[in-house]
Image: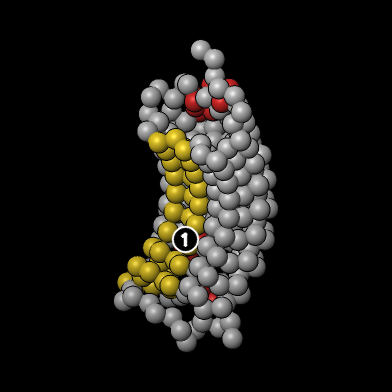
Amino acid sequence: NNSINDNRNWNNGVSMGGDVTKTENIDVSNRGISSLDDVLLGNQVSRVLNASSNSLLRLRPFPSTWTNSLQVLDLSENRLVMLKVDTFKTLHSLKVLDLSNNSLSSLPHLFHSNSKLEVFNVSKNNLSVLNVELLGNNINNLIELDVSENSLTNVPNVMGCTKLQVLNMRMNLISSIPLTFASNVNNLRVLKADVNAFNRLQDFIPGLRSNNGHLEDIDVRNNPFVAIVEE
């Protein structure tokens, strides 16, 4: 039974006018549901929506009733294979989005201009490329990006993500870091790059040299390095 109408555990809400009520948290995780339509089109919106560990295959774009309320959205551990263009475009207040452990092979233009997104987790999917610029215009508030356990052959294009502090790209197929990488992420503190395909430090270190010294934690374990840098 995919209906969740009888299983909702809402917090006490406040009226937003009309028939819509805003709550702190809506948790429909681990219910075996294959659709979020009952939630998205219902008369409740929330700051946090947890729909993880279900059987969601696709997702309708969020209606405008969610525009100023939703800040944290967890869609992890579902069966999502694709997302429609502008799926999250109406979510002007969204700060945390977890799409981990799905079956996404590509990501379209998902966000509105001047997104407030700070944390984006798309680990454990089937991505072979990720260009943050193509996800939406001005994704410049991003602080943490997790693309681990995908099939990326190149470092994610994070141009414009000037506030990025944590990048987890472990367990991919990346073999080099472009020379311009660090200049695009001057505030990067943590870089997880273990279990990739780096085989020369010359392909790794030069792209980090213009980081202005903010890097505190670099993990490059379990890469097939065969050479050292000659100073």
Q: Left or right? Give the position of 17 relative to 194.
A: left
- Looking at the rendered image, the quarter that the N terminus falls into is bottom right
Whole-percent x, y for residue 214 in the image? 37, 29
Front in this rendered view, residue 210 or 111: 210
Q: Residue at x 47, y 31 (%)?
A: 185
Q: What amino acid is labelled 1 in the image?
A: Leu
Residue 106 can be seen, yes or no: yes
Q: Is residue 58 above or below residue 150?
A: below
Q: Left or right? Give the position of 8 relative to 199.
A: left
Whole-percent x, y for residue 209 in the image? 47, 21
What residue would you read off at disc 1? 73
| Numbered disc total | 1
Front in this rendered view, residue 224 or 21: 224
Front in this rendered view, residue 53 or 50: 53
Q: Residue at x 54, y 44 (%)?
A: 170
Residue 136 can be seen, yes or no: no
Front in this rendered view, residue 75 or 64: 75
Whole-percent x, y for residue 144 in the image? 44, 44
Q: Residues within 10 Å of mark 1 (few under 14, many from 20)?
A: many
Q: Residue at x 58, y 67 (%)?
A: 78
Indicate the secondary structure of the residue bearing disc 1. Answer: strand
Q: Which residue sits furthest top?
A: 231
Q: Left or right? Give the position of 24 relative to 196.
A: left
Q: Is residue 3 above or below residue 130?
A: below
Whole-percent x, y for residue 42 in the image? 50, 75
Q: Residue at x 63, y 66 (%)?
A: 79
